[in-house]
Amino acid sequence: MTGVQTCALPIYKLMEQARQFGVQGDADQALATWKEALAIAPNDPQVQNSLGMAYFIHGDVAEALEHLRQAIRINPQFAEGHYNLGMSLLHLGHPDQALPELEADVTLEPRDASGEEAVAVVSDELGNSSEALDHWRKALAIEPRRSSALVGLAWLLATTPDPALRNGPEAVALA
């Protein structure tokens, strides 16, 4: 047991240091520390995921996407990796590529209100208001007082071009 603790301790220390640098706003040091962690644990999906996000913050999109995808290759059940890859792709203007990743996130983490919101946004952006409506409602079922979900659902109900889904009174009540 001591050998396992000895091997794991350096990586956990580095991961915590990298997170702290990120919280403090020191993106350069966070990136450098995540790179150190990768040298010790290249097959750790959390390290790959976090390094990918650090690269994304630095604007190195290609490197970011490679590490985010690697995290999912290592562990296809890693919901956070799917979410971060999906949100990165959405941010880059690729909602069609983002949707399957975000759907994987909410399948793996059915209580993820942020993931449900993201699927709602992407679904609406892709023209599927009905699907978006379902995911806004799921986000609210998970967190009934979530203001972003209340606003998103209200906006969709008030502005959808689909008259079967439009519901002004409900939109006003939610707003």
Image (tube, grey):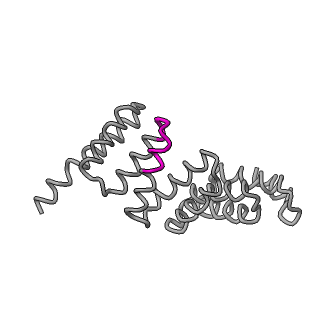
| 63 or 135: nearer the viewer | 63
Identify the residue at the far front of this view.
Answer: 62
| 112 or 128: nearer the viewer | 128
Q: Residue 30, image x and y in percent?
A: 36, 37
Residue at 37% over, 62% down = 74
Magenta stretch: includes residue 121? no
Residue at 60% over, 45% down = 91
Picture mark count: 0
Position of 53 relative to 83 (above/below): above
The dominant secondary structure in magenta is helix
Position of 106 relative to 35 (above/below): below
Residue at 75% over, 62% down = 128
- Chain part drawn in magenta: 56-66
Position of 164 relative to 42 (above/below): below
In the picture provided, is 98 more to the left or to the right than 79?
A: right
Identify the residue at the far right of this view.
Answer: 163
Q: Quadrant of residue 156?
A: bottom right
Q: Residue 162, image x and y in percent?
A: 86, 61
Q: Residue 164, image x and y in percent?
A: 87, 66
Residue at 63% over, 54% down = 145
Q: Residue 152, image x and y in percent?
A: 71, 52
In the picture provided, is 5 more to the left or to the right than 38?
A: left
Q: Quadrant of residue 78?
A: bottom left
